[in-house]
Image (cartoon, rainbow, N blue to C red):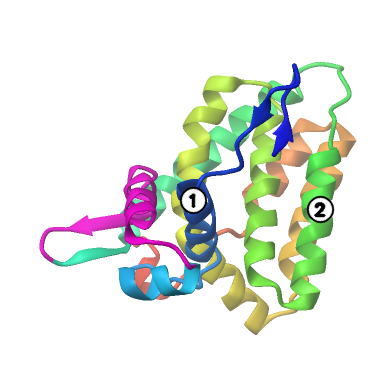
Amino acid sequence: MVAGPVGEALAPPSLVELTVDRLRAEILSGALAPGERIVEGRLTERFGTSRAPLREALRLLGEQGLVEHLPRRGVRVAQLTARDIEELFSLRDALEQFAVRCALGGPVRLPVDDLRAAVEEMERAAVEGAEPEKAAAHRAFHLALVGLAGHHHLMRAYEPILLRLQLYMATNMRREAADRSVLDGPKRHRRLLDAVESGDAERVLMELDHHGSRAYLAPELRSTD
């Protein structure tokens, strides 16, 4: 138990919350691939839980767009079309650019500790081959980048887009690591961090424009429009 701000005891995370966190981590790291069927019996055995919290966790993940409930066919990890991915990436790009302009529109020095911590975690995880940790650090970096704007409604719009894109971004990063150095992805984020620290909005926007998020998507997922 954990003490609250006035001494009251706080309950530990519920089984549902723990199940959501673990299942979401497996989906976002690519351990459960887009389109893969989710077999409740296997997960309850692996997670050591009953079906009730698992089903509630799947319902919540469905609301987040990470799983799909199919009539009479059960549940699977969500799949996106090439058009879905292109639209989500274009939205992500627009929101990140807006965040940068908001954050770097004045003389205030930005707190970049969260960005730096995420880059360092990406570097460590890449070297150690820790895919779930690398995916989590990647997501944390982009959330921290948009968080620099201090714009709560922007963050509420941005986070679900990033969450859905990460269904494919984890695979994208693995393809890149197999084709190039495992540190190429973290190096791109290190350059973006350096640009943010410079306070030069145009430099940051240029780095974002060359960030390479789509470079290693499977060919069938690249929009030809």
Span colored in magenta: 48-72
Residue wearing tag 1: 15
Q: Which amino acid type is shown beneath numbered disc 1?
A: Leu
Gap between marks 2 and 1, in whole Å? 39 Å
Q: Which amino acid type is shown beneath numbered disc 2?
A: Arg
Vertical relation: 12 (above or below) 131: above
The quadrant in which the N terminus is found is top right
Residue at point 46%, 43% (across, down)? 161
Residue at point 83%, 49% (across, down)? 117
Residue wearing tag 2: 191
In this rendering, the label closer to the viewer, 2 or 1: 1
Q: Nearer the viewer, residue 105 or 21?
A: 21
Residue at point 84%, 47% (across, down)? 116
Q: Nearer the viewer, residue 62 or 30?
A: 62
SS for dot 2 = helix
Q: Residue furthest bottom?
A: 178
User: In the rendered image, which quarter is residue 189 located in?
Assistant: bottom right
First reached walking from the N terminus: tag 2 or tag 1: 1
Inspect this view and state whether residue 130 appears.
yes
Q: Nearer the viewer, residue 169 or 121?
A: 121
Residue at point 40%, 65% (across, down)? 222
Spot occupied by residue 164 in the image (x, y as percentages of width and height): 44, 51
